Image (cartoon, grey):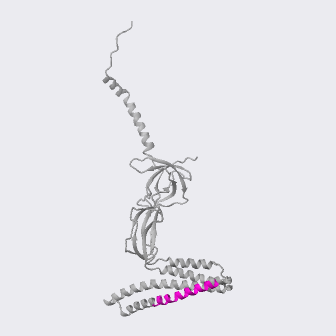
Amino acid sequence: MKNHLEPIPTPKEQLWKEFKLAYLPWVVMALALGATWWVWAHVLIAPTMMGEVEAIRAQVLSPTVGVVRQVVAQRFDEVRAGDPLVTIEPTDTRSLLSGIGLELDLLASRMNSDSQLTLRRAEADYYSLRMDLLSKKVELEQNKVELVRAEKELARSEELAKQNYVSQELYDLSLADRDTAQKTIEELMIAIPSLEEGVEKLRVEIEQGGSFISSDFASRIEALEERLTSAPSEKNPIVLRAPIDGMVSGVWCSAGETVTEGYVLMMVNATEAERIVGYIRQPFPVEPFPGMQAKIITQSTVQRVLAVTEVETVGRFMEPITNSLARLSNDQAVDMGLPVSFRIPKEVQLRPGETVGLVLDNRRK
């Protein structure tokens, strides 16, 4: 006999209670396992090694002793290669002028030993006279520099002599140096025009006679003349330009400051990184090789894989780690590692100097 009675409905509270007791623990455990797997796979990835995005820096040095006349770029300014940064007025160009004079002496010695040129006596005389003229011009510029130095020394000695800090003999020597430089300049100013007139006259005679033959001596002399004309001076200051594209990260000079040769005036950092350099320590967890696949991990609050990269180059020797990747213990003076460089994918934006994690894939293709 069938029971036509309707089933007794179960209250929702009772169903929820049974679900919590029978099924909810399994659901929670499944979610916990899934979350754990995701965290281990995407967040808590243990890097094989740490790397640093290589920062390209270029120092801007003073090529000579001088006075900073203008500082064009300031810190954090973005510059392009060739943009002016600093203008320097040189105060001592004796080394540059001495170099031109030395090259001129070598050229004269070579000309005297040229047998073919000796046969063309008029042309040899022309080159000899032209080099003599250039030598006088170099000497004139050297004495101008010496005169400026002597006048400064004389002014200093005169002030010290008034206060009886230097003897009269030292003051007289400074005065004699100044007078000698002035007299030499006056003599050269008289001699140079006559030499120029003689050079031009001889050149015209050789060209009219049709015996002028082009020689590398002419180009060498012209190059030296151009160097002398463009030599830095008060009227022709040195303009230092940006060596690379980037941002000015440091300025260590100001207008009116006297700087020495080799003084660091500015630092320019490239804003575009080219590679990641990491160091793998002993014992090696893997043996890196060019083309090995790797993953880049940022060092943010929540680490995430940025992209897949590959090994570019593996160093052939261990070297000291001197950047932010070094880890030194109390009993360790040097941290050694094997350098490995990685390619930076185009779609990845990394800052130069940034530290990243690298997970190496030891499988070969």
- Residue displayed at 41% across by 38% down: 35
Residue 129 shows in the view: no
- Residue displayed at 64% across by 84% down: 206
Using the image as rendered, state which of residue 306 and residue 208 is in the foreground.
Answer: 208
Question: Quick check: 171 left or right of 339?
Answer: left
Q: In which quarter of the view is residue 31 placed?
A: top left
x and y percentages locating residue 365 in the rendered image: 58, 46
Question: Quick check: 305 left or right of 155?
Answer: right
Quarter containing the N terminus: top left
- Residue displayed at 37% across by 72% down: 255
Query: What predominant SS class does the magenta segment belong to?
Result: helix
x and y percentages locating residue 48 in the rendered image: 48, 50
x and y percentages locating residue 149 in the rendered image: 42, 84
Residue 200 painted magenta: yes
Using the image as rendered, state which of residue 295 and residue 127 is in the foreground.
Answer: 127
> Please, is residue 217 above or below residue 41 in the view?
below
Question: Quick check: 259 left or right of 163?
Answer: right
Q: Residue furthest front?
A: 208
> Please, is residue 198 above or below residue 239 in the view?
below
Question: Quick check: 158 left or right of 206?
Answer: left
Using the image as rendered, state which of residue 84 and residue 173 is in the foreground.
Answer: 84
Q: Which residues are magenta?
A: 183-206
x and y percentages locating residue 53 in the rendered image: 46, 56
Residue 268 shows in the view: yes
Using the image as rendered, state which of residue 56 and residue 101 is in the foreground.
Answer: 101
Q: In which quarter of the view is residue 220 placed?
A: bottom right
